[in-house]
Amino acid sequence: MPETPRLRPWGHATIDTACPLDCPDSCSLHVSVEEGKIKKIDGSHRSQTTGGYICAKVRNFDRRVYGEDRLLYPGLRTGPKGKGVFARVGWDEALDAVAGAFAEVRDRWGGEAILPFSYGGSNGLLSQDTQDAELWRKLGTSRLARTVCAAPTGAAFQALYGKMPGVTYADYAHAKLIVIWGANPSASHIHLVPVIREAQRHGAALVVIDPRYTQLARLADLYLAIRPGTDLPVALAVHRFLFENGQADMAFLAGHARGVSELRARAADWPTDRAAAEAGIDAEKLDRFARMYAERSPAVIRCGWGLERSRSGGSAAMAVLALPAVGGKFGVRGGGYTMSNSMAWGLRAAMWIQTPEPATRLVNMNHLGRALTEYDRPPVRALFVYNCNPAVTMPDQSRVLRGLARDDLFTVVFDQVLTDTARYADVLLPATTFLEHYDIAKAYGPVSLQLVQPAIDAVGEARSNPDVFSALAARLGFADDAEGDAETLIRVTSAMPENIRTDLLDHGVATPPHDGAPVQFVDVFPRTPDGKIDLHSEALAASAPVGLYVYQPDPATDRYPLALISPASSRTISSTLGELREHTAKLEMHPEDASARGLSEGDSVRVFNDLGEVQCELKVTPIVRTGTVSLPKGLWRKSTFNGLTANALAPDTLADLGGGACFNDARVEVASLGRH
Ligand code: SF4
């Protein structure tokens, strides 16, 4: 076995590594260490995109590593579920307890009574879909559909283009029109912002489409403050404009696309006036956007993940991603779309998972509450949570919490800190952070693949994901020995193409295809079965309950007229780092809506619907459009007065494609709670 690499001698004051958190940018990092402790975390220049600077979240990540919530030792629950009281035990005792309980559940109820539950809390390639997948497959557990984010856009993107890589950040400098649709780069992929500013200085026009007046919206030439969930009619109106005004690139479509007539027929239903009325914006503004898009090239659309979080979210993503095809925007540098570039390397976990996937029950993670409280064939009797904090991140939060509180549910939580979910654990296992283990960081904004290497020894008795899952597999009789993260790194990279493996292990960074800046329809092409853009995939249409490009009306009612959104903030990455938030969260509400309810800045309010109630403070601000209120994504329970977050008001209905969550379909009313 080749020796495990270290890019710098161990003990050197500065370690080169990378950020594998769930953020598109995947920054390259310099971590300064003194006497075995982190002194400073900063951006390096190894990744051109990083350019030597990073976000404040990771610059201050040592607050998580050494914070008071950090889990240092395994524990067994001693108090009531949810209270977070544990007795310290050794790893052997903790792992024996987990293996024993899992074997018992499997023998009595069947493997499907065990539900592994994970998402992107650590997005590194070694932290998920390595030994964990081998273990769950061998145990025959229920399978998890990881749908809480990117499922509708992923389904749309796959069907349309086979996930053809998109325009990378640096190429925005070549664009004459930049459209930011349902994304807030200032909060969640900061390295795109300076390139946009540079492009603006060179004459690019900027259009921002978002219910919230983001930092980039303030700098935009045109801002469309659309009502949440109305992206589909807006995009279809632009398609209609292109087709009706001779601005659709019919020659390109004839050579490179299928399903044109179906898309055109759906778009015909949405004249500008009708779409603008549905979206709650001026028809003149929508018309202006359509003209700008028709006339300016190169034009790039950054399609974000905000627009997928509603009932028509999958079709909305399809319609937005189809615009460059209909508008003839491909084939030039700076023209096309940016979605996710994670598949640019062609790496799939199937390359290194050896155990075949059994056809066991598939549980949509957005239905965790139902799974824990209703499923009975078999009931979920054991839950293993890692890389994720479902007590605060899943829809219908109250039902999730009821499920987690079940006394007959055996719950294991393997995490870095005492999350809200960890408080419900029967067995608590401490996990290493990315500063304490090997991993591989794959960006999904830029095209980059970097080695993550430990800067410090594991804090307390924390262990890496590969180490713990292989140790459990050994206890359950599926493996001879535990395999640590270093050995897993060697094994996983061995399954990669030789050039990628060598680059990663010898230099810490792989050389990207097309210099990391492919031009669509010059360097890269659709990866669909026949190489064409499929604007109306029959397979996808068959899976969509209402068909493709079909708008479903706003779920608002007279009782609950306000749309509640929960966008990403600059403080957390989903819920990661939520433990560090010190102040109570504020609900943002437009002054007109506040005035209509007799509410004022700083009031304590109740935000409610039939699913529940969140109690918090009010911020009156025109940053949100009328008819919409906003609470930050990723809040922990301590961040509101009553321990519930925006997800307590989000239904667990599913989007039209991919089984995605409909967080932005929460409709609520707001009333005064009386001062605290
Ligand atoms: S969270 Fe994003 S911006 Fe921050 S360091 Fe990680 S990759 Fe960079």
Image (tube, rainbow, N blue to C red):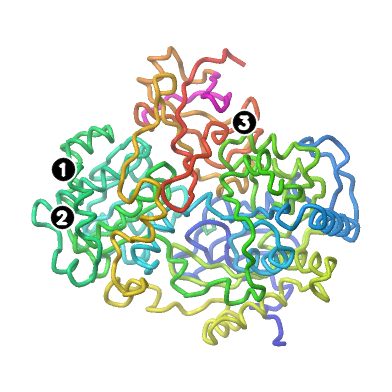
Residue 479 coordinates in the image, percent (x, y): 80, 74
Give the left or right position of residue 567, taking residue 244 as reference: right
Q: Residue at x 73, y 52 (%)?
A: 113
Q: Is residue 197 visible?
A: no
Q: Which residue is mark 1?
A: 287
Q: Residue at x 22, y 52 (%)?
A: 205
Q: Which residues are magenta?
A: 604-622
Residue 359 coordinates in the image, percent (x, y): 62, 63
Q: Earlier in the sequence, mark 1 or mark 3?
A: 1
Q: Is residue 79 visible?
A: yes
Q: Residue at x 37, y 21 (%)?
A: 591
Secondary structure beneath dot 3 equals: loop
Secondary structure beneath dot 2 equals: helix
Question: Outermost residue, left direction?
Answer: 246
Hey, which quadrant is residue 355 in on the image? bottom right
Above or below 171: residue 244: above
Q: Which residue is mark 3?
A: 644
Q: Which mark is residue 294?
A: 2
The answer for how far apart the CA atoms under marks 2 and 1 are is 11 Å
Give the left or right position of residue 594, taking residue 337 as reference: right
Residue 457 coordinates in the image, percent (x, y): 77, 65
Q: Of helix, strand and loop, which mostly describes the magenta segment?
A: strand
* Tag 1 near tag 3, CB within 8 Å: no
Secondary structure beneath dot 1 equals: helix
Residue 644 coordinates in the image, percent (x, y): 62, 31
Q: Residue type at mark 3?
A: Leu
Crowd band around label 1 with a 10 angstrom C-alpha radius: few (<14), some (14–19), many (20+): some
* Tag 2 near tag 3, CB within 8 Å: no
Q: Residue type at mark 1?
A: Asp
Q: Residue type at mark 2?
A: Ala
Hey, which quadrant is residue 194 in on the image? bottom left
